Image (tube, coloured by chain):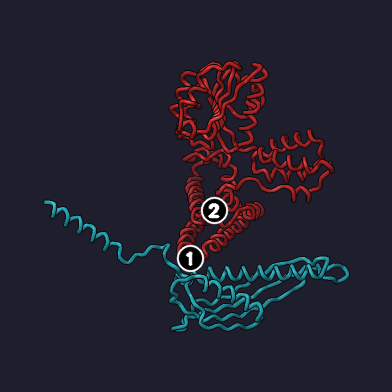
Chain colours: A cyan, B red
Amino acid sequence: MIKNIYFSFLFIALLSFNGCSGYKPIFSSNNLDFTITKYTINGDKKLGKRLYSKLYNLSKSKKVNKNRNIILLINILSKKNETSKDSTGKALEYKITLNAKIEILNFSNENVILNEVFVESSNYKVQSRYSETLKLENTTIENLINQAYQDLLIKFAQNIDLK
Amino acid sequence: MIVKSYHIEKNLNKFLKYNLFLLYGENEGLKKDIKRNLQTEIKNKNGSLETFSFYESEIIANDKNFYNSVYSDSLFSNKKIVIIKSASDKIISQLSDVVEKCPENLFLVIFSEILEKQSKLRNLFETNNKILCIPCYLDNERSLEGIAKNALRKEGIVLSQECINLLIEQSNGDRNNLKNEVEKIKYFALNNKKIEINEIRSLTNFSGDYKTDSLVNDCLCGDILRYKKTLSELYTNTINQIFLLRILSNKIQRLLSMKEKENDYNNLDNLLSANKPPIFWKERPLVKKQLNIWGLDDLKKTNNEISYIETLCKKNPHISKIIFFKFISSICKRANSFS
């Protein structure tokens, strides 16, 4: 009698284990595991390096086995325009536009994982001292690079999720 | 019996025939003020007063001590006040006993955090007509302005309306925080009676913390300025984005179900009143605004997006904060464009 109950329990347990096959816990997955195997930077090399270093740091931050090797192509350009001037023609405000074309390819089969253009822009006012204006300009560019980086990561995660 | 806090503040003498007071809610400053006024009034009336303080944990650990303080007579004064801090349903049996016997020489003041409607402690005080239940909600801007102006006038400090508004903003709806900020200004103003807004800005800081749902409410209302302000005050490293996404999802689902029933009612007020579970009165204007802003299709679309974003956050835990904040900011911008 006890043996029968034992076997029936074992059977139900086996069935339930089998029912779970194919599923994996969502929290343990790590979609953004990648290694940058090869990279090319075009356009503004300084800005491209800054964006690349952010991605490189992210790829280095995890200590798990990386099974996704990627090729990274960055083409980044920045443009500065005057948006307002005073009566003497002196610029009062500038607009900086960052145009980053990012292409991520799978290293093994050269399939395109991501091919997007990220356009970010921001305005900043001219300060009384030139050094302060320059500082503000650098902060604005840094913010724009951060924004482009964040958008890139989200798109990258979404595209990996779809594939 | 439920009594509004402003009735107590206006005419405390009228309520001194009651012996037991339950003060619950988030406004610590208001609770302290009521307790202080109660102590002064009783002292003025009876000449002397003995005060005992207990924490809930102390009563649970040794209720004999508590009963001794409550039921024994004092040789030094004919009235005594017993204060219980951080009370909850755990000491309901001890409090029921005191309520039943209700000693005449005793004033019992119970401090509690926010108590739910189902709370036994709250029910005990609300249903019994011999004892008082006083909800202490956050102060509104008008009452805070009055408190700030009075406090500043007492010290002879002149502040512009802009400065007073800033102080009110920083106080997070609690007069206790406001008084702390005024205290700082008082010491700063020892040499300088006229203070500028920049000095106030550097002197004061935001008190307390934002409620978890205030960010979500600002976002759904499309109030970009308030949203940015709340975001800047939040310590983003401690935010649980999945929890916030669940709050957002619940709020959107509530708006969805209300939008579907909108045609059955003459106006939004009737719809809000008929909603089940009932909407808290403080949240009503926000829900009304959100109902005006959002359309049915937009709500459905956003609801679907939330599920997708939640999965994306869980699949990419190391960039989940970036995903969450980008998403919630996009909803705020969308709501702003609708309004």
Farthest residue, direction front: B75
Q: Toward which corner of the image does residue B231 lie, by quadrant?
A: bottom right
Q: Earlier in the sequence, mark 1 or mark 2?
A: 2
| Percent of width and height locating residue A135 | 75, 69
Q: Secondary structure at mark 1?
A: loop
Residue, disc 2? B295
Q: Is residue A144 above or below residue B248?
A: below
Q: How many marks overall?
A: 2
| Percent of width and height locating residue B200 | 76, 47
Residue B316 image label: 1
- The local crowd at label 1, few if under 14, some if 14 to 19, many if 20 or more residues have their Cα within 10 Å, is many
Farthest residue, direction right: A88
Q: Is residue B323 above or below residue B156?
A: below
Residue sitting at x 54%, y 70%: A153
Query: Would you say the residues marked 1 and 2 are in contact, meaning their CB atoms lie under 8 Å apart?
Result: no
- The local crowd at label 2, few if under 14, some if 14 to 19, many if 20 or more residues have their Cα within 10 Å, is some
Distance in Å between CA atoms under marks 1 and 2: 31 Å
- The subunit carrying tag 1 is B
- The subunit carrying tag 2 is B
Q: Is residue A83 above or below residue B181?
A: below
- Type of the residue with mark 2: Gly
Left or right of A55 on screen, residue B207:
right
| Percent of width and height locating residue B218 | 60, 51
Which one is in front, B288 or B208?
Answer: B208
Q: Toward which corner of the image does residue B41 lie, by quadrant?
A: top right
Q: Secondary structure at mark 2?
A: loop
Left or right of B131 on screen, residue B176:
right
- Type of the residue with mark 1: Asn
Left or right of B232 on screen, residue B245:
left
